[in-house]
Image (cartoon, rainbow, N blue to C red):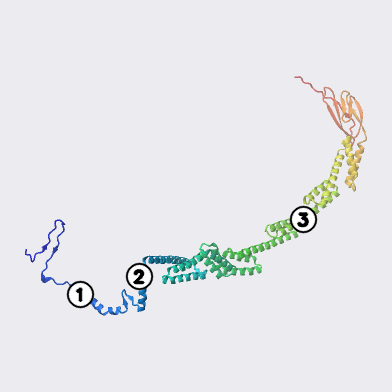
């Protein structure tokens, strides 16, 4: 190929092993500018026109870097500040930055506490100290603008400390708020109480006192209306209906002490009314002659828990009346028994009286006398029933003492006098001997008990006082015999036979 139209190839460097570049040689006639070059030239022309016609207008008002033009005086001040800035050393500039940073840190703390307080609606409870703290912060801003960062920090710090003091005072504020809320509640100021309790809940969301107080404050209007209605019912004597309203109050406000007190008071009034009704029934039973039912009714009234002393007094009075009636009945019976000289019956009735009231003198003394008369009556009756025992000297003497005791009684009744007369005759007859004929077989040894041995005989006679006797006969080889007989009292036998006739058989082993 010729040198004019052939592509030129750069040789390969064997040391670098680079890939050869190819350069195309175009004909001179075909080297025309591409289209995009014409677009670029047009853009440059447009830019030149803008610089020529528009830029001078802008430059008259602004200067780079697009800041508003300042007056000559301003330029002088800026020139002085630039000279001052240029005069500040790097160390001073560092100290100044440090103080700026300290001021900003304090301001950040201030803003953080401010945010907490605003969330707690600080202007509702601490407006004046809050505004004073913010004023200190505003003063700090003024110092900051003049780049007096030391004074700015001090002002920010006073503002921050004021806000922190407000935040630290929250427990006291809460307590004061609760006290004021309770006062509003006591004064029946529903709106005020709700506002204060709401604030307390804002300050301490977990406050049980504030939660309960707010609930009570919200129900206050309804509670007040119920109280008014209940009071009217009380005046009309509608105790049960008033009680129901007070219960409704407690359903709305369980902590309402007035409702609790009124409910207790109405309950007592209702119970007292019931007590009066029951007591009336008891007295009615008493008037109808049924003391036992009256006592049971009075006991029912005493179990109600009110006016118990009155019910017990009624029970005691009724029991006393019943006891008196019983005692009077027994006294009549005693009088009849004593008149009939039935002394043991009288003693029994005296015991019944003393069981009712052991301190009754008439019963104590009456029983003692009746007991002695009953004992005398028993001794006389026993002596009269067994006169044969008078043959024994000791028995005779004892019976004689009993006889004289009876004779010494004043106002002796006919029964006693009759007993004494009969006993007297028996005693006299008991001392008159009676001849008794004894018959035997002259082989039997006879002994008369309480008299002596009579020996062997076929027939003998013994003089004996009236009484009971025993004759014993013994004979060797014969079974012993005993003969009992009574002398006197119309029982004297014509003769007494004492003989041993039954032989004893002796067996050998």
Q: Residue at x 23, y 77 (%)?
A: 48
> Which disc number belongs to residue 86?
2
Residue 315, above or below 54: above
Say which quarter of the image contains residue 324: bottom right
Residue 350 visible: yes
Say which quarter of the image contains residue 112: bottom left
Q: Are marks 1 and 3 in contact (CB under 8 Å)?
A: no
Residue 73, above or below 205: below
Report the residue marked by disc 1: 41
Residue 182 in picture, x, y percent from top left = 58, 66
Determine the CA span between mark 2 and mark 1: 46 Å
Q: Residues within 10 Å of mark 2 (few under 14, many from 20)?
A: few
Q: Secondary structure at mark 1?
A: helix
Q: Nearer the viewer, residue 121 or 76?
A: 76
Extreme residue in the left direction: 2
Say which quarter of the image contains residue 488: top right
The mark nearer the N terminus, 2 or 3, is 2
Q: Nearer the viewer, residue 502 or 231?
A: 231
User: Closer to us: mark 1 or mark 3?
Assistant: 1
Determine the CA span between mark 2 and mark 3: 123 Å
Query: In what quadrant of the picture does the C terminus appear?
Result: top right
Residue 489, above or below 152: above
The mark nearer the N terminus, 1 or 3, is 1
Residue 308 in picture, x, y percent from top left = 70, 58
Q: Residue at x 47, y 70 (%)?
A: 136
């Amino acid at each position: 190929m010729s040198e004019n139209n052939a592509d030129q190839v750069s040789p390969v460097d064997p040391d670098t092993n680079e890939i050869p570049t190819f350069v195309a040689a175009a004909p001179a006639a075909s080297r025309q500018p591409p289209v995009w070059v014409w677009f670029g030239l047009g853009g440059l022309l447009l830019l030149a026109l803008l610089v020529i016609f528009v830029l001078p207008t802008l430059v008259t008002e602004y200067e780079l870097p697009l800041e508003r033009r300042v007056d000559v005086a301003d330029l002088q001040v800026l020139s002085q500040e630039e000279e001052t800035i240029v005069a500040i050393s790097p160390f001073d500039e560092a100290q100044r930055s440090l103080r700026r940073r300290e001021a900003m840190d304090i301001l950040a703390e201030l803003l953080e506490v401010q945010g907490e307080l605003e969330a707690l609606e600080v202007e509702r409870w601490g407006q004046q100290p809050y505004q004073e703290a913010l004023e200190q912060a505003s003063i700090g801003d003024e110092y900051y603008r003049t780049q007096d960062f030391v004074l700015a920090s001090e002002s920010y710090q006073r503002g921050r400390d004021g806000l922190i003091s407000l935040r630290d005072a929250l427990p006291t504020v809460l307590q004061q708020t609760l006290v004021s809320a309770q006062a509003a509640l006591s004064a029946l100021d529903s709106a005020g109480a709700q506002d204060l309790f709401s604030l307390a809940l804002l300050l301490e969301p977990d406050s049980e006192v504030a939660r309960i107080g707010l609930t009570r404050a919200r129900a206050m209007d309804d509670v007040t209306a119920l109280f008014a209605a209940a009071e009217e019912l009380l005046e009309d004597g509608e105790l049960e209906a008033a009680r129901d309203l007070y219960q409704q109050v407690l359903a709305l406000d369980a902590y309402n002490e007035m409702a609790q007190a009124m409910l207790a008071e109405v309950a007592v009034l209702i119970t007292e009314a019931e007590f009066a009704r029951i007591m009336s029934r008891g007295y009615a039973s008493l008037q109808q002659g049924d003391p036992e039912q009256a006592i049971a009714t009075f006991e029912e009234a005493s179990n109600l828990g009110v006016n118990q002393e009155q019910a017990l007094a009624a029970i005691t009075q009724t029991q006393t009346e019943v006891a008196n009636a019983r005692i009077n009945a027994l006294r009549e019976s005693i009088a009849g028994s004593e008149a009939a000289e039935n002394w043991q019956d009288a003693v029994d009735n005296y015991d019944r009286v003393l069981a009712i009231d052991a301190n009754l003198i008439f019963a104590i003394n009456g029983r003692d006398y009746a007991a002695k008369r009953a004992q005398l009556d028993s001794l006389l009756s026993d002596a009269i029933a067994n006169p044969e025992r008078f043959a024994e000297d000791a028995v005779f003497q004892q019976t004689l003492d009993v006889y004289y005791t009876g004779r010494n009684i004043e106002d002796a009744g006919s029964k006693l006098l009759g007993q004494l007369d009969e006993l007297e005759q028996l005693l006299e007859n008991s001392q008159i001997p009676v001849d008794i004929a004894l018959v035997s077989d002259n082989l039997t040894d006879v002994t008369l008990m309480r008299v002596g041995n009579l020996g062997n005989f076929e027939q003998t006679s013994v003089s004996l006082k009236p009484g009971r006797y025993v004759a014993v006969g013994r004979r060797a080889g014969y079974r012993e015999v005993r003969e009992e007989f009574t002398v006197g009292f119309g029982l004297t036998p014509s003769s007494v036979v004492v003989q041993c006739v039954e032989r004893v058989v002796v067996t050998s082993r």
